[in-house]
Every structure is written in structure tokens, then in C-alpha cells.
Image: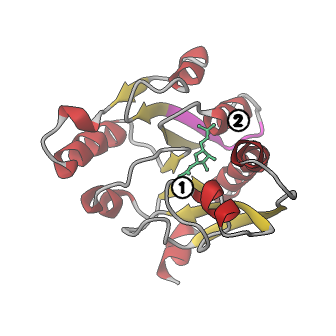
Amino acid sequence: MTSLVVLISGSGSNLRALLEATTRDDFPARIVAVGADNEASGLQHARAFDVPTFVVSPSDFDSRESWGQALLNEVQSFGADLVVCAGFMRILPANVVQALTPNLINMHPALLPLFPGAHAVRDALAAGATETGATVHVVDEGVDTGPVIRQVPLSIEPGETEEHLHERIKVLERELIVATVSEIAHNRINLKELARS
Ligand code: GAR
């Protein structure tokens, strides 16, 4: 059984999908803790499933590096096999990435390498794209630059708002993150090999 720590910053709908998947007997992973960089509303999902939570807020630290080290200490205290950033909206410092990668994956609401960063849905609309999607990738030291694990495309509707499009992407993301974690846990995806390529 693969153990997961999930990191979030917001409403945690992808976390919720993972938590629900872990109640199925045939799902090969369990969430051992959920961490956040603020008192994110999504932490309530973890509490509803009796999963331990922790918050490590950058505002409590003098530097990104000391915040990152405290976050890493929390994550590592749970001894998880895989760390899943599911709507975690902070760039992890290099020491955190180096300690965890390639067993550190991120969900992103675009078809990377297109539209990296914190406003992927807005940026896709502003660029006049007719297609976007969702990506799960290994986290490296860049911003959304790590090797792509899985992607799903989605057509953009004419005149679609950012909010509407993001909600449609999130529907895809929830399936994608559950399926990808399952494949990793079944050793059908080799993160080490991916990270080397
Ligand atoms: C998701 O769309 C995720 O891809 C995105 O935040 C949302 C979180 O939704 N992450 C990023 O943009 C990272 N750059 P959720 O809190 O409902 O799971």
C-alpha cells in the first residue's frame, strides 16, 4: 500500500477525490496526512476522513528556506512514499524539492509546458487558446517544468469565463489525479525513470 501526503492551499476538491478513492478496497494508496500553507478550507475534507493535518505558514518564518525546511520536516515525519501537490499554490524551495523528488508530483490546470504558473486558466484564455487541459507532473526545481506524467486535453468553449473553464478542468483533474496515483502505486508508472528522461 502506497502512503501519501497531500499538500493543498485552497478548497481541496482534488484532495476530496483522493480521499474518496482511498475508501475503495481496490485503491492501492492511503493518505497519511494533509498539509497546507494556510488554514485552507480544504483541510475540512481531511478532518472528515480522520486524516491528520498540519499547517506550515510562510508568514511564521524569516525566509522561504526556513519555511521549506519546517514543511519538509512535517512531511517527512509521516514517512510517506509519495507527496501530491493538489492545488498547493507555493513554489517549493530547492532543498524541499531535492529531498522529495521524484516522489513529489503536482497537478496543474493546463497542458504543460503551456501556461505554467499560478494563473494557468486565465493565461490560456488571454492567449486565445482553443484547447487547454490538465497535467500531472513530477516536481523539479523550476516552476511547472518537471517531466509530464499524464495529461488530458479539453476544448475551450467560445466566450467561456475563467471560472467556468476552471470548474470543467477540475472535473478532469479529479479523475486524472486518482488514476495517476493508482498507476504509480501499482508501479505502472516509474517516477525515477521519468525524472531521468
Ligand atoms: C486545481 O485546478 C489545480 O490544478 C490548481 O489549483 C486547483 C486546486 O483546486 N493548481 C495550480 O494552479 C498549481 N499551479 P482544488 O483546491 O479544488 O483541488
Q: Is residue 29 left or right of residue 173?
A: left
Report which quarter residue 17 is drawn in. top right
The amino acid at mark 1 is Asn
Question: Which of 108/184 is in front?
Answer: 108
Question: In percent of the image, x 68 and y 44: which residue is there?
Answer: 28
Residue bearing the label numbered 1:
106
41 in magenta: no
| Residue 188 appears anywhere in the view | no
Residue 188 percent location from the top left of the image: 69, 65
The amino acid at mark 2 is Ala
Q: Secondary structure at mark 1?
A: strand
Ligand 1 within 8 angstroms of badge 2 C-beta: no
Question: Which of 121/2 is in front?
Answer: 121
Q: Is residue 179 left or right of residue 41?
A: right
Tell me which image quadrant ligand 1 sits in: top right
Q: Is 163 above or below relative to 146? A: above
Question: In percent of the image, x 43 and y 65: which residue is there?
Answer: 143
Question: In percent of the image, x 74 and y 64: which residue is there?
Answer: 132
Q: Is 151 above or below relative to 180? A: below
Residue bearing the label numbered 2:
17
Quadrant into which the N terminus falls? top right
Residue 110 percent location from the top left of the image: 66, 62
Residue 23 percent location from the top left of the image: 72, 28
| Residue 5 appears anywhere in the view | yes
Question: In percent of the image, x 49 and y 60: which residue is there?
Answer: 117
What span is in magenta? 26-32
Report which quarter residue 98 is drawn in. bottom left
Q: Secondary structure at mark 2?
A: helix
Question: Which of 42/72 is in front?
Answer: 42
Mark 2 or 1, nearer chain start: 2
Q: Which mark is residue 78?
A: none
